Amino acid sequence: MASSTSVIPNSVIPTTVNPDLQKERDAASFSSEEFAAWWAGGEEVLKFNRGVREYMEKDVDYSEMLQLQNKTHEEIIEFSTRGAIDGAKKLRRLQEERNPSGDVYWPNMYDNQVMWGLVPGGNPFGVMYVMLVKALQAQCTPEQYEDFGKRVERFEICGTYAQTELGHGTYLRGLETRADFDRKTDEFVLNTPKISSYKWWPGGSPTTAWLWLSCTSTNKCKGPHMFFIQVRDEDTHEPLPGVHIGDIGKKMGFIGVNNGFLGLKDVRIPRTRMLMRHAQVKADGSYVSSPTNVLTYFAMVRTRCVVARGNAIMLAAAATIATRYSAVRRQSPINPNEREPQIMDHVTQQMKLFPEIATSVAYRKASDYLWNLYDVTIKDIENGKYERLPELHSLSCALKVTCSMDSAAGVEKLRLACGGHGYLTSSNMSSIYVSATAACTYEGENTVLLLQIGRFLMKTWRAALTGAPLPPTVSYLAEVQKNPEFGKWTGSWENMVKAMQYAAANRTQLAFKSLSNRLTRGETEANAANHTGIEFTQAAELHGRAFVFSAFTEAVTGPKSKTRSANFNRVLENLLELYLVKETLNQMGHLLRFINLTDTDLSRLQDRLETVLTKLRPDAVAIVDGFDFSDLQLNSTLGSYDGNAYERIFDAALKNPMNQKSVPKSFHEILRPFMKSNI
Amino acid sequence: MASSTSVIPNSVIPTTVNPDLQKERDAASFSSEEFAAWWAGGEEVLKFNRGVREYMEKDVDYSEMLQLQNKTHEEIIEFSTRGAIDGAKKLRRLQEERNPSGDVYWPNMYDNQVMWGLVPGGNPFGVMYVMLVKALQAQCTPEQYEDFGKRVERFEICGTYAQTELGHGTYLRGLETRADFDRKTDEFVLNTPKISSYKWWPGGSPTTAWLWLSCTSTNKCKGPHMFFIQVRDEDTHEPLPGVHIGDIGKKMGFIGVNNGFLGLKDVRIPRTRMLMRHAQVKADGSYVSSPTNVLTYFAMVRTRCVVARGNAIMLAAAATIATRYSAVRRQSPINPNEREPQIMDHVTQQMKLFPEIATSVAYRKASDYLWNLYDVTIKDIENGKYERLPELHSLSCALKVTCSMDSAAGVEKLRLACGGHGYLTSSNMSSIYVSATAACTYEGENTVLLLQIGRFLMKTWRAALTGAPLPPTVSYLAEVQKNPEFGKWTGSWENMVKAMQYAAANRTQLAFKSLSNRLTRGETEANAANHTGIEFTQAAELHGRAFVFSAFTEAVTGPKSKTRSANFNRVLENLLELYLVKETLNQMGHLLRFINLTDTDLSRLQDRLETVLTKLRPDAVAIVDGFDFSDLQLNSTLGSYDGNAYERIFDAALKNPMNQKSVPKSFHEILRPFMKSNI
C-alpha cells in the first residue's frame, strides 16, 4: 500500500459493537427475535436455517468476498465456481450426516439464501437446479430421466436451460433454432442457421449437457420442444463437433454466473433425446401433440412466486444495510450547536428508509399468500378443477411485476440514502440493485406481463358485465360495477384496500372503453389491444397493488395476529400503516381521478405519514435485525452487525490490490514521461 | 474461443447499414442535420466539434473499448490513464497547430464529450481540470498561482480536490482534518486525527500535489480553508513522510477514475501554502477573514449547470442506443400471421423511448436557459448587484436535482427497454446509468439541495405575503397569492406551465403552513424545518419542474423558432407536447389536489399522449441521429449508427478473454474433480 506512515493500526476493525447501534437495539420496543422467527416461518425454521448457515459460512474469508469486484471477468467466474462447488460439498455432507435418505439439504437449499455468503456474484449452477432439473423432471419420460436426468440431479454432468436466442426472448414461437427429423437415421439434425438463432443467455457451466428448446420439424414446424444434447466431451470438456459454445461476456450483475452462447451446425442426436413425456415424435416421423400445457403454465406461476419472494428479500437486505449505516453515521446538526445527529434522525432520511422496510415486508407477505393459493390450486388441479388457473397466473404476473419494479427502485433509493459510500462496490448496494433490477426482465419481461394481465382484466370486466361469477381476487371488479359507494373514502386500512381496488377497477373500465371504442372504429382486436397498451399496463399495475394491499392487511390484522405479542403486533401495524399511506400517496394521481378526497383527508394522510415515521424510528434497527441476515450474506462494509462502517470501508480499501504497491505501474510507463515531455 | 465449428465468419459485422434503420432515416419528416446544428449551438459549432472529434478518435480501437469491463480494477485504471494522456496529447497538438496562443482545444475540451470515446470509464484527470485548476485560479494569490497553479495547469504536476472525508461530506463545518499554525516555524501542521477524518473520494491521480480543504486553526478553529500540499515525490512518485495515500477501491461507476484516500500525520507545510486570495493567516498568527463568499457560491451555480447539461446529454446517449435498437429488433407480431414488427411499433415501447428523448431535450434547453441567466448575473455582480444570486443558486440546485433524478430514472427505463441485451455491459447502458445516478449524490446531495430550496421557498413565500417584489423565476408565487384563477385548467402549453407553477405554489403554501404551525406550537426553527422536511422537498421538486416547463416552452415557442424550418419546428413542438403531457400526468397526484380537471380533461390528456407518440414514431431515429454521437462515444453494441446490433453483440462476446481458450481452467481444477468424486 502507498504509505510511508499510517495512523491506522494493522487491524482496523474493532471487536465491539458501535455504541450508536447498540443504543438502538437496547431501546427497541419489541423483540427482534420474535420478528426473526415470524419472518422465517416459525422458531423451528429459524433455528434450522441458522444452523445450516453457520455450517455453510464456517471458514469463508469475508474480506476476500469484498474484493470480488476488483477481479477480471474470468477470475470472478472462477471464484464463483469454487464457491458454488464448496457449497455443494457442504450441503451434500450435511445431507449425508443428518438425513441420508432425504433431500432437505441437498439439493434443496442449493439455490437458497444460505448460499449467498459463498457466491456473492451469484451461483453459476443456480439455473441448473432451479430450472433444468425441474424441467427434466417435468418433461422426461421415466426412461429418459433414468438415462440422463438423474445424472444431472447427482451433479455427475451439468447443464443449463437454453431457451432464449440472440434474436428472440419473449416471443417463443419466433425461435429460429431448428431440429429436423431424419427418418433414415432416426435422428434429429440441429442447426442455428443465423447469428440471431444462436442460443444466448443460458446461465451456468454446461460440461456435457444442455437442455434446449427449439422448433422441431417433421416436414413442418410444430412449435417449440425440448431436447437434451451433449455439447462438450465429458472428460476433456472440449466442445463436440458442430458445437460452437462460449461466454457472452460481462453483465451488469450476476457477475459470477457464466452465461453462455451456443451455436449448432448439423449436430445429430438420437430421436430419443427429445423430451417426450408430453409431445412425441415417433420413429415413422408422426407427431403426437401434448394433451395439456397446464403444468408448464403452473411451473411459471411457481417461478414467479419465487422471483417475488426473492426480490422482497433483496429489498430487506438493502434496507438492513442502509438502516444500520443511518444509525452509525452522524451528519449535519439539526439545531445549531447541538451534536450532529444520527442521520436517521433527519425526517427526510426516515422517508428514504422506513417505507422500503415496509415494502419488503408487504411483498414478502403477499408472496406467501400467493404461495398458499398456489398450494390450494395444485390440489384443485389434481382433482381436475382448472378454474382458478388464469386468475392465479395473472396474479403471479402482477406480483412479479410490481415487486421487481418496486424492489429495484427501493434498493436504489436505499443506496442513494447511503450517500457517496453507497457508490462503493464494498457497500454491496450496487450489486443488490443489479440483482433486483434483473428480475424486471427475466421470467417474463414486465411490460409483456402487464399486457397479459391487462387482457385478462378486459376479459374479466366483460364477464362481470354479463353477471358471470368471478374468482375471489378479482371479484372486486363486479362489486365496483354494482356499488358506486365502493370507493368512498374513510381512511381506514380496510377502506384503503377498497380504494386501491376501486382505482384498479376504474382504470380497467377506462381501458375497456378505449378498447371497445377502437373495435367499434373497426380496428382489429390485435391493433386495438396494441393501441390501448398504455392503459392496459396502468390497470394491471393497480390490480397488482390492490392485491398487495389486501394480502398485507390480511397478514397483519388477520386471525394469526393472536399468536403474536402485543408489542410485535404494534410494530407490524406501524409497518402496515406506513405501507398503505405511502403507497396511497404514491398512487394519488390515479386515486383522485376516481375518488373524492377532501383537502382535510389529504392533509390527514400527510400527518399519518409523518406520525408513523416517528413511531417507527426507535424500532428501525431492531426490525432489520429481525430480517436475520448474516454479515456474509449482506457482504457490505456499511451494513455489518457491529456497525463499524468506517473501519470496514477502510479495511476493504487497504486490501484492494491497487494498494499493495506504493507506486502504480502506470506512473512510470504513462504519466511521468508525459509530464516531463511538454507534448 | 470454445469452438470446433462456427457458423460465424471471422468478421461478423457487415459494412452496410441495417435496412430497418435505413428505412427510418429515409422516411423522417425533417433533417437530422438541422437538429444536430441546433443541438450543438449552430452549424459552425457542430462542424468544429465534429472535426475535433474525428481527430481525437482516429486510430482508437473500438473493440478494445468494449472489453473494458472484463479487466481488473487496476487494469481499468491503467487503461483509462493511457486514454486520458493520449487525449491530452492530441488536444495539445491541436492547440499547437491551430491556435498556439489560445486555449480553445487544450485544456478547454479536456473534460468535454470529445473525450468520451477515449476514456469510457471516465477521465482520471477530469476533476483536475474541472475543479482543481478552477479552484486554484479562484483562491490563489497571483504569486501562488505563478508558483504552483500554473504547473498544474500545464500538467507538469497533477493533483486533485480533496474535500470530502470518510466521516463528512455534506456538512463542511464538520470536517475533522486539522491545520494547526505553528508561529515558531511559520508552518501549518496537518493531521487527520481519526479514521473518519481521512480524505476520501478525491478523484484522480495526484503525483505531487493535492489541494484540500480543512479546518485551519490559530488557537481556535476558523472553519474550512484550502491548502496546497505535496503528497508524493515528483520523480519517484513515492508518498512523502507522514502521508498515507491509496485507492478507495472499485465503485459502481467511473471505474476508470482512481478515487483516493489521504491521511496525514504531522505533515508540515509553509504558511504560504494556504490559499490566501481571500482569507489569510499572517505570520503573527492573526487571521483575516474573507470579505465575501459570493464567488464560491457562484462557482457552485456554474458546476450545477454543468452537471444538469451533462446528465441531459447522458440521457440523450441512452435514448440514442435504445431507439436505434428498437428500430432493428423485431419481436412479437401485433396481428397474428403478420411479420414481427420493429419493437418500436409496440405502443408500450414508444412510451418507454419517446418521453425520455423529450426529457433529454427539455433538460438540455433548461440548462442552456440557466447558463444564460448565469452570464447575465455575473455581469450584474461585476456591477455590484447581488440581488439575483439566491434565486439563481436555488434554481441551479433545483435543476441539478430534477435533472439528475429524472435522467437516471430515464436511462434505467431505456436500459430496461432493451430487454436482456440491455443487461450486457457491451450495451453500455449500465455504464451510462451509473454515471447518471452518481450526479444524484455529488455536487450537493439531492435531498440536501431540495431542503435548501425549500427554505428559500419559505422565505420567498413570506416575502410575497408582505408584498415585497420577487425575482422573475419565483414571481409566480406572488401571482398565485393574488389570483385564484391562476391555475384554472385549459390545457394549452402556456396553461400547463401555469398549472405546474400553481401546484408548486400551493405545495409551498402547505409547507409554509405546516412550518408555521410547528413554530406556533413552540418548536425551534430548526426542529420545525426538520419535521417539515418531506413537504419542503415536495415543494422544491415542483418548483424545479415548473422551471423546466417554462424554459422548454420558451425554447420551442419563443422568437428563435423563426430561425428554424417549419418541419423541424413541428418535431420540436411534438417533443414539447409529449414532455408537458407526460410530466403533467406524472405529477397528477399533486395537480389534482389543487386544480379541478374534469374527467374529459383527463381523458383528453391520455388521448394527447397517445396521439403525440404516434406523431413522433416516424421521426424517432432521425431525432436521436440529431444528437450526433459517434459510435465510440456511445460505445455500445446495441446503438451503433449502422444498427448491426446482433453482429456487434456477437463480435464483442467472441473477443471476450473468456473465449480465447476452449476449456476454462476452472474445469480441470474445480469442476471435474468434484463431478467425479461423488462427495
Image (cartoon, coloured by chain):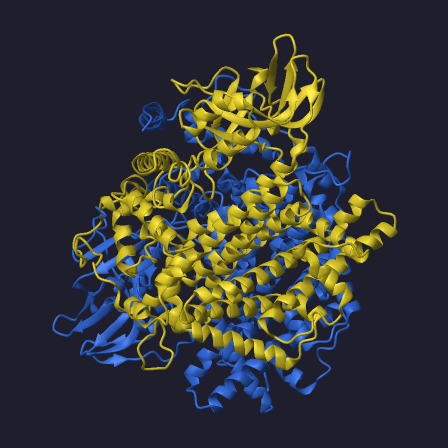
Chain colours: A yellow, B blue
Question: At which x and y percent is residue A535?
Answer: 72, 56
Q: Report the quarter where the C terminus of chain B lies.
A: top left
Q: Residue furthest front?
A: A383
Task: Tell whether B199 sits left or right of A10.
Answer: right
Vertically, is B622 above or below A556? Answer: above
Residue B528: which quarter of the image? Answer: bottom left
Task: Tell whether A373 sits left or right of A462.
Answer: left
Q: Residue furthest top?
A: A184
Residue A25: which quarter of the image? Answer: bottom left
Question: At which x and y percent is residue B103?
Answer: 45, 54
Question: At which x and y percent is residue B114?
Answer: 51, 47
Q: Report the quarter where the N terminus of chain B lies.
A: top left
Q: Kindly tell me whether residue A154 is visible in this rendering.
A: yes
At x 55% / y 37%, what residue is drawn? B637
The residue nearer to you, when weighing A329 against A659, is A329
At x 67% / y 33%, what residue is drawn? A292
